[in-house]
Image: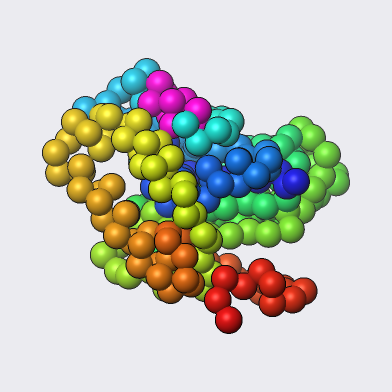
């Protein structure tokens, strides 16, 4: 089993981008930790206390743990202090695999978060550095899509989430201040359902989520391919 860290700029980014994958990995026995860089507030209908309750509920639905790093919302900066904070979490969790938002985005917090995580992956392996936990270099860094750009994702691998669509949906609507109370955001779940179905059709399954990697994924055989 693997130790997996999923980093989100704000609570709900992980659920939106890869909630089905998170739920499936957790059900398979992997140790999944969600790391929120900020508390996501202020928002029009939310507040820090309510958002924290919603985030905890979403994590419970997905069957995973959650941690708040505590950087200021809308002011996330790529700097040494932030890198070392994330590197400390990587080491404490002994993360084998790290997920972070796709590196092209319209939201400054998303862009900064990904830069921080990319560098923190390197920092976490350094031996002569004052950080908690034992040094580790996560074997994999994967990117999930929760972008604010109006463009169609071009992933290079898809993860089968068939059977976990409802779990993802429930984890998203757990954020009532974000996706239930504001009427304009209610359709987001419908859009995601359509996306899951489309990507699933590309690999011959019911539903799938898209991901990107800069490093090649190796295969030891053809038995792990969903389509031949």
Residue at point 42%, 52% (across, down): 17
Quadrant including the C terminus: bottom right
Is 43 left or right of 133, judged from the image as shown? Answer: left
Residue 54 vertical placement versus 16 (above, below):
above
Q: Nearer the viewer, residue 38 or 29?
A: 29
Q: Position of residue 33 (x, y in %)?
A: 61, 37
Magenta stretch: includes residue 59:
yes
Residue 144 visible, this angle: no
Residue sitting at 50 percent across and 28 percent down? 60
> Quick one: 56 or 42, which is closer to the camera?
56
Name the spot of residue 172 as percent of width and height, x first. 36, 39
Check the image and report above or below for 157 versus 26: below
The residue most toward the left is 183
Depth order, front residue of 161/118: 161
Frontmost residue, 89 versus 63: 63
Question: Can you tell which quarter of the image residue 134 is in?
Answer: top right
The magenta segment is 52-60
- Tell whether 34 sits left or right of 18: right
């Amino acid at each position: 089993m693997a130790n997996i860290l999923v980093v989100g700029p704000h609570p709900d980014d992980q659920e939106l981008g890869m909630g089905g994958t998170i739920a499936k990995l957790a059900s398979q026995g992997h140790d999944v930790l969600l790391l929120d860089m900020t508390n996501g507030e202020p928002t029009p209908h939310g507040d820090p206390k309510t958002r924290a309750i919603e985030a905890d509920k979403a994590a419970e639905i997905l069957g995973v743990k959650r941690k708040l790093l505590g950087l200021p919302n809308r002011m996330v900066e790529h700097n040494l202090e932030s890198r070392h904070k994330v590197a400390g979490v990587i080491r404490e969790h002994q993360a084998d695999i790290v997920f972070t938002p796709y590196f092209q985005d319209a939201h400054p917090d998303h862009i900064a978060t990904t830069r921080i995580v990319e560098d923190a992956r390197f920092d976490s392996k350094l031996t002569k550095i004052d950080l908690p936990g034992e040094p580790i270099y996560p074997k994999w860094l994967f990117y999930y899509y929760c972008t604010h750009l109006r463009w169609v994702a071009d992933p290079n691998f898809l993860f089968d989430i068939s059977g976990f669509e409802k779990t993802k949906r429930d984890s998203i609507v757990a954020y009532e201040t974000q996706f239930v109370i504001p009427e304009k955001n209610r359709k987001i779940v419908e859009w995601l359902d359509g996306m899951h179905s489309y990507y699933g059709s590309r690999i011959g399954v019911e539903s799938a989520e898209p991901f990107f990697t800069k490093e090649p994924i190796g295969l030891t055989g053809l038995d792990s391919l969903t389509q031949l």
